[in-house]
Image: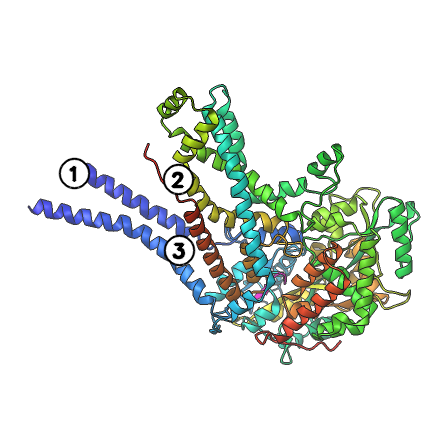
Amino acid sequence: MKHSKLFRITVLLLAVVMTAGVLAGCGGTAASSSTAASSSAAAASSSKASSSSAAGSSSAASSSASSSDSNKYAGRTLKILLSVGGGGNYYEPVAERMMKMYPGLTVEVDYNKAAEDVLRTKALSGDAPDIFNINTGFLPPYDIISQGLAQPIDDILNETTLDGSKKLGDILDKNLFSIGEVDGKHYVMFGDCSFLSGLWYDSNYFKANNLTVPTDWTSLLKLADECDKLGKDVFGYTGVMASEYACDYWFWPTVATTDYTTYTAIQNLDVNAFKSDGMKKVVDKMVTLRDKGYYDANTMGLGNNETQMAFINHDFALLPCGSWLEAEMADAWTSDWKLSYLPYSFGDAAGAQQYMSVSPLISMVSATTKNMDLVKEFYRTLFSDDATITSAVKVTNNPMSISGFAAKYGDLLLPSVKECDQSLDSGMKALVNPVTWWYTDFDTELANMINALMGGEINADEFMQRGCDLVTKIKNDSTITKYTFAG
Amino acid sequence: MKHNRLRTRSDRTFDAAMTGIPTAVYVVLYLLPCVAGLFFSFTNFGGYSLSFKLIGFANYKKMFADPAFFKSILNFLKLYLGTVLICFPLALGVAIILTKNPSIREKHLYRVIYFFPSTVPAMLIAIMWMAMFNPTLGVLNRILGIFGFKAVQWLGSTKTVMTSITLVVIWRQFGFYMVYFMAGVTSIPTDIFESATIDGASGWRQVFSIIIPLTWEVIRTSMLFYIQSAVNIGFDIVYIMTQGGPDNASQILPTYMYQQMTKNLDYGMASAIGVAMLVVTMVLALVVLKLTKRETYEM
């Protein structure tokens, strides 16, 4: 009997321990990391819900502040959630700087590859971080705004820079703020890292093979012929991630350059926009590339890293990609390579207005934050402290959308990124493609359409019809809030 | 008598604890989320805020109006049937060869080799096969080239992508089911085979008249078990390799649901797809049970 009792107690304890073990596996956060990751790595890692140890936090820095205000935030904590993407942990220098300026203040930056999952559980439990900056591919900002998680940042834009000379709203790129505006209030903070994009090529390869650098459609076709004679294609894009690469870095700039009226009409869900003359010209260009064999169809089934490797291998000449390309493939470039930016977006004539998509990393302020004063201080430091800006840019290798950036900090950028940034100063215009922010289904179906057209599954008329059907579906869906693009 | 009463109470407490704890875990971790999912399918829950409202059958209407939904069901069925019709006969055949052929001395080595892929995380397998499927650098097209065949767009063509995905899943699952069937074949008493041999039954006759009927319950259980595996493994393989593309040609129900949840932040719609997935898998299970029902034999 005694033996039986001992056995039962042991079995019971085992059952309790196993149950506790099962429940302990719930929740938790992924380990934080300070290395930059590609967008495909972020997509791959975010597909796994499992997570391990708690995120790290920035350590408090000692300081010898002389100002009598320096202790005003002592004992307080500012919590920030930042996701892995192309940016790297560029908030860490800001946190360190703030803790140095204000002894006793703790700034915790949770740099987490599963940030959207972390935000979900924290928001539902009423413990949302004060600031969150999460890849918009995983956290559409308009959905966050409509769910009441974010609060307006207009007060922050009225704050002065650290030297008191200007307001933050005056030094940030106002064009970007057309996104995230609802009922006259702005909910999204832009500017801390803007990824530029467009077409990239190897200028050394072009020189060595006497290839034409295109400035209009005719010269692009000439380049395509030249590449064809070398046994190469002129153009390729990652089919697996077409919703970003093909749509944002190629299709939208092509539409805007070919016919800006058509571009505006699509943003405003004009049902006939996809059958307009402007769109016909765009589709004709796409079909020309396909039918003449100028498009590298092998890239249709490749992810972004594989496509970028094929690009480095000179399988094709022009790659639509973001300005993180040079840093992301740092270990893969060969000594004969010179990555250059092509300030041309498939326009018809030389001298036409060219466009590039700008993909800013965005942050939002929690609707439930009790630390608005600290939040304002964070952004003042991020956008107007020289040492902070320099440290942050060294992490991201991409520009901040603040006035005077190119002149003061341009040399911090990698050569290809600097070249791309200078294109904006020399006449290229930035696009933010609001239709993809407002209606999250849009670029998924647009990517399907582009892949189907370039893969030969559909013809030009079917592409345009699918575009019309897509616009009609969104327009007729009464559960989706509609927005207006002013152009 | 007092001693007997205490013992009975102790027994009852133990029984209650042994059944109660797993039941509680099952209810909390499985049943409650299922009920919650069903509830959320009638709401516009976005996943980040508890301020949502009931919207009736709007999510279901949206789901049925989306051609991608029907494509994902069809692709899921293709994945399931492709694996069952190719992987299972292959696994059973190899299991029989390794079990009933005494001349193969290295059967344990073969068992380890064939079983190994099923122990590798699906993500690693997907990445490895993406490299093999690479149209220019991949080993498969290189082999085709040696024999004079044209390179295939394994993952880049709507015509071949689902076949490629099914091939990867079959490669991964083959070893697991082979080992499973080996256990079934090994459990058949050897005197049945000796009697059959004495009676003049050929090897093939023994396979169809003895092995398959006596392992039928094992095969049937595997087919049912595989419905759940197809959901889990299918998601990992498809999401890493193609994300459902090109043009939804490899979209299956789990990836379609995940897309609604993460890209569109539409947990309500994702929950509706989850309910649909439950119905599809239940119907599939019932069909499998009905079609595979046959007389069982005692050994």
In the image as oriented, which residue stretches furthest toward the left?
Answer: B1
* Mark 3 vs 1: CB contact within 8 A: no
Note whether A244 is above or below A472 in the view shown. above
The percent coordinates of residue B263 (x first, y second) are 60, 62
Which of the 4 image quarters holds residue A288?
Answer: bottom right
Q: Mark 3 or mark 1, which is nearer to you? A: 3
For the residue marked with disc 2, what is the amino acid? Glu
Q: Which residues are magenta?
A: A130-137
Rendered view: B190 above or below A165 = above
- Residue, disc 3: B29
Q: Is residue A371 above or below residue A97?
A: below
Q: Secondary structure at mark 2?
A: helix
Is disc 2 surrounded by few (<14), some (14 to 19) or many (20+) residues within 10 Å?
A: some
Question: How far apart, in angstroms, are the residues tagged by discs 2 and 1?
Answer: 41 Å
Q: For mark 1, what is the residue?
A: A1
Q: Chain for mark 1?
A: A
Q: Which residue is mark 2?
A: B217
Residue A481 drawn at (x, y percent): 61, 76
Q: Are marks 3 and 1 on the same chain?
A: no
Q: Amino acid at mark 3?
A: Leu
